[in-house]
Image: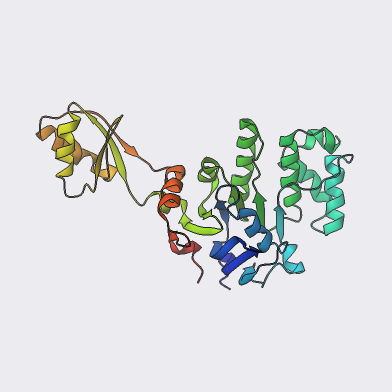
Amino acid sequence: MDPQFVVETQGLSKRYGRVTAVRDLSLAIARGGVFGLLGPNGSGKTTTMGMLLGLIRPTSGTLRLLGNPGAVPGVLKRVGATIEAPAFYPYLSGRDNLRFFQGLTGKGALGDIEALLARVRLEGRARSRYATYSFGMKQRLAIAYALLGDPEVVFLDEPTNGLDPAGVAEVREFIADFGRDGRTVVLSSHILHEVEMVCDHVAILVKGTIVAHGAVRDLLGRKEAVRVATTDDAAAMAVLKGLPWVERVESTVDGLVADAPAARSAEISRALASANIYLRRLEPLETSLEQYFLEVTATAPAGAGTTGDGKDRPK
């Protein structure tokens, strides 16, 4: 086990009869920061988390959690998680629910609970019954539960599901803070924009198979492009195609898109001006995670994957 990784899997698979929920998952999650398991509903994200936490028995393959073969009891005290909907008691207050689970699990101390409630901004409703909580408040209590015992690794399964935009932004802020304070957050989500905003690294799952993984900045930075609008786009396309370091140029409703580094914008401007073509706009065009997701899921053959940097690659 490499100490820089908190999770390592090799060939991890789960089958239910003829249905394969997760297929040959080989992955390593580095210590610290926020790691995203990204994919549409039914892609195998929750099944993967369940296997890592010992809630689901793998059909084949191996896994290590914090250096140990599987979710052994001693390791689970160093891990926090919310998988699907936590089963809180509706007629207990938020504070008493946390007290109950702290006593049941032995994670942390009773004295930690007030600080946890404050951290997820529930201190003002700590005495209210869980049944009176809004959906967003219930999600925040679930996050507080996952933080009992100050875990090294926190698994959060679709934590923004069902929240309004304000609630999504609030939970996103919590997750980013957790990743900055030294712990590792493993976040599953089908909301690409949210993952892009908070995750350092990501694995994209489709039908139980990883089709891409790596650092978000590396996955999205593989191809630089600029958007260009000129006084004569047809003539500008010919000029840009003649530049040896421009890989591709295509016409769009907003002008031209050229696969070229933004750092060479001055050279683009000079080449166009030399042909008596003048810029109306030139701006870097960054690939979004949504665009990348659509690209890799459309082109990757079943069972194949691509990687960004080596940090997510098992050693």
Against 203, residue 251 (above or below) is above
Nearer the observer, 24 or 275 = 24
Nearer the observer, 16 or 237 = 16
Residue at 71% in and 48% down:
84
Residue 192: x and y in percent read: 52, 43
Does 199 sit left or right of 50 as displayed? left
Nearer the observer, 42 or 194 = 42
Q: How many marks?
A: 0
Residue at 79% in and 56% down:
108
Give the quarter of the image for residue 73: bottom right
Residue at 50% in and 62% down:
312
Does 249 sit left or right of 291 as displayed? left
Residue 293: x and y in percent read: 46, 48
Against 55, residue 258 (above or below) is above
Residue 210: x and y in percent read: 51, 59
Quadrant location of the N terminus in the rendered image: bottom right
Residue at 73% in and 69% down:
72
Against 311, residue 266 (above or below) is above
Does 20 sit left or right of 71 as displayed? left
Residue at the far right in the pictured view? 91
Give the quarter of the image for residue 29: bottom right
Q: How is the image coloured?
A: rainbow
